[in-house]
């Protein structure tokens, strides 16, 4: 019985000790001996985003003739209201890309923007306005922006739908804005559900490896879903630290020893 108790205790101790969450599990962007090619990294940073279905665009038109421009822009009162309402104001007053990839622009009607970059949409709107309503001397200026970068986080991270008013957001910033991954979250295999014209695809990224900065999924896109799975250690019910595991081991040993002596005295 003593030998069996000893062997059983050794197994329990080894399992719990191996279940500790180490620095390698929680530290982001570690140098694992992978080589980062700066040219590839710079190329990814400069890659423009192409507009997808359900994106919301903010379009502003300026020219010397302010009265004529006013019909293409929301009124000042609406702009102030949008600023106060935040994302809801942008939803009602922005230009939503429909299922066919079009936006409905005042006077001009439907304009297809699916798959175009922000710069290309600016040129497209400017060309149509110049062709139909403005002269070359009008000094027309068109600004197009994404009305916030909206994404969703779920799993071992602050769950919710978030909006950041930035042109570019990497996944580290997105997770930090959501409250960061918990200690029991799997940073080695974070899932990104991304929208494409032909449907959705699931991508994987290891955030503990510095090579993640080269990944095409390091920078999030509008409507991304970031899913963080739990570590296997969590499913085992082991503690997150050595102290928690020692406490668990002591409790198990106490029960085993008490059981042993009780059975021995019978």
Image: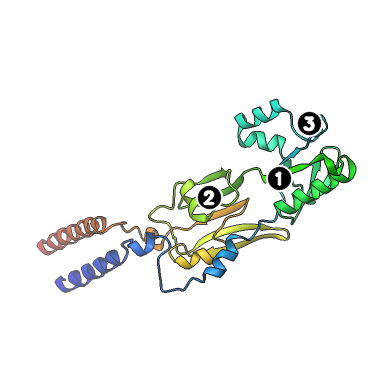
Say whether residue 14 is left or right of residue 176: left
Quadrant for the N terminus, please: bottom left
* Residue 158 appears anywhere in the view: no
- Distance of mark 1 from mark 3, alpha carbons? 18 Å
Quadrant for the C terminus, please: bottom left
User: How many badges with numbers are in the image?
Assistant: 3
Question: Which circle marks residue 144 in the picture?
Answer: 1
Residue shown at 27% from the left, 65% from the top = 17
Q: Is residue 191 above or below residue 54?
A: below
Residue shown at 75% from the left, 42% from the top = 141
Q: Position of residue 244 (x, y in %)?
A: 26, 55
* Residue 143 appears anywhere in the view: yes
Question: Which circle marks residue 153 in the picture?
Answer: 2
| Neighbours of disc 3 within 10 Å: few (<14), some (14-19), many (20+) | few
Find numbered disc 1 in the image and state the secondary structure of the residue it sits on: strand
Residue shown at 63% from the left, 51% from the top = 222
Which residue is at the far right? 132
Quadrant of residue 249 in the image? bottom left
Find numbered disc 3 in the image and state the secondary structure of the residue it sits on: helix
- Per the image, the residue denoted by label 3 is 66
- Distance of mark 2 from mark 1, alpha carbons? 27 Å
């Amino acid at each position: 019985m003593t030998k069996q108790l000893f062997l059983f205790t050794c197994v329990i101790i080894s399992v719990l000790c191996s279940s500790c969450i180490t620095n390698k599990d929680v530290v982001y962007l570690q140098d694992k001996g992978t080589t980062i090619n700066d040219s590839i990294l710079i190329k990814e940073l400069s890659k423009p985003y192409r507009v997808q279905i359900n994106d919301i665009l903010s379009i502003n038109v300026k020219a010397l003739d302010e009265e004529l421009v006013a019909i293409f822009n929301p009124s000042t009162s609406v702009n102030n209201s949008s600023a106060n309402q935040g994302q809801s104001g942008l939803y009602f007053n922005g230009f939503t890309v429909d299922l066919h990839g079009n936006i409905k622009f005042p006077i001009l009607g439907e304009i297809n923007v699916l798959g175009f970059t922000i710069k290309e949409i600016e040129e497209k709107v400017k060309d149509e306005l110049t062709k139909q309503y403005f002269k070359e001397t009008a000094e027309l200026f068109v600004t197009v922006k994404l009305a916030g970068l909206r994404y969703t986080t779920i799993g071992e991270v602050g769950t919710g739908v978030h909006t950041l008013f930035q042109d570019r957001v990497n996944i580290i910033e997105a997770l930090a804005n959501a409250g960061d991954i918990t200690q029991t979250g799997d940073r080695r295999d974070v899932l990104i559900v991304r929208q494409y014209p032909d449907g959705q695809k699931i991508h994987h990224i290891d955030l503990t490896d510095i090579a993640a900065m080269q990944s095409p999924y390091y920078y999030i896109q509008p409507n991304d879903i970031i899913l963080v799975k739990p570590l296997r250690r969590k499913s085992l019910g082991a503690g997150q630290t050595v102290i928690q595991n020692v406490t668990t081991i002591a409790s198990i040993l106490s029960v085993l020893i008490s059981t042993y002596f009780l059975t021995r005295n019978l």
